[in-house]
Amino acid sequence: MSRIILSIFVLCIVTNIHAAGSNVPLEKVLIDLSNKHSLQRGAQIYMNNCSGCHTLKYQRYVKFIDHLDLDPKTIENNLIFTTDLNGERTKIGSLILNAVNKTHSKEAFGVMPPDLTLTARSRGSDWIYTFLLSFYKDESRPFGANNKLYPNVNMPHVLWHMEGIKEPTDKNLSDFMPKTNSEGEIIYGEFSKQSLVRLTIDEIKKKLSTIKDPELGINIYDLGLIYDINIDKGNNVKIIMTLTTVNCPVADSFPLDVAKNISSLENIGQVKVKLTFDPPWNKDLMSDDAKLALGY
């Protein structure tokens, strides 16, 4: 998820400088600038979650045409939410500012939230990625969260609804995160060599049937999003799934949600979830119940 948000920052990055004085190792972020869908989701997540407080005042909206492979109308309708001093819609050629009052920001956060083009340039993409992953629960703080990389930062954990709430820990940041292997599979839980109690495909299907697509409200098994389920002798499960569209706003978080949900089954080992769009989803993959519920 945080990699997607970094996609929008990388468009502005020219250096990769580590934070001075930090003793927390930085996690390496892998960003594919050729993946336009990923960049588009990054822009969407940034505008929905970050732009209310942070500016990108050294970047113009018009750059998104080439960087994100979007037409001007799509950018105006989906990525521009501000107005000028006369109340007119911000033009696509404008710098990426926000409507936050400086006085209000200082009252709320103690400081003015930094411009993120400058943060990307001075600290680097790895620093931002690690920072976004470093929030943990701390009820002593005004917003109920603290940050391992930047202790006592005056910023709420704005992505908690996507990333979850982490408990305090002395483990490394990498222990917080699910792993992703070279095949793009989300890996959740510990690998098991052998299990005395074998899980069945039907048990996995039943669990998948409790997970609803966040947009359509139909469970993902009846919706036809599950392409394959495999269980080995250690109850390690591999699921290949898809989404209804490559532009799905939860494309970078939903496979992990599925992995976590399946991992709650008793006697289960490691769960791998691979997202694919080959073949692309179509309504013929739905069950009769799903078609009836959606009016097909």
Image (cartoon, grey):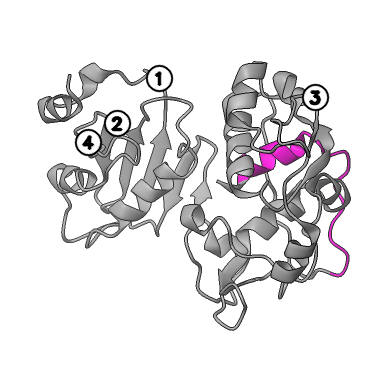
- Residue 148 left/right relative to 280: right
Disc 2 on helix, strand or loop?
loop
Amino acid type at circle 3 is: Gly
Task: Characterize the local packing of mark 1: few (<14), some (14-19) or many (20 or more) Cα atoms within 10 angstroms.
Answer: few
Sequence order check, earlier mark of 2 and 1: 2
- The image's mark for residue 71 is none
Magenta segment, which residues?
Answer: 3-21
Mark pair 3, 1: CA separation: 37 Å
Q: Which residue bears the numbered disc 2? A: 225
Q: Nearer the viewer, residue 56 or 35?
A: 56
Q: Which residue is mark 3?
A: 93
Could you tell me residue 148's position as x and y percent?
Answer: 67, 70
Check the image and report above or below for 145 versus 103.
Answer: below
Question: Mark 3 and 1 residues: CB-CB less than 8 Å, in contact?
Answer: no
Q: Give the alpha-carbon distance from disc 2 to disc 1, as whole Å.
A: 12 Å
In the rendered image, residue 99 lying in the magenta stretch gets the answer no
Asked if residue 5 lies in the magenta stretch, the reply is: yes
CB-based contact (under 8 Å), mark 2 and mark 1? no
The residue closer to the viewer here, 254 or 63, is 63
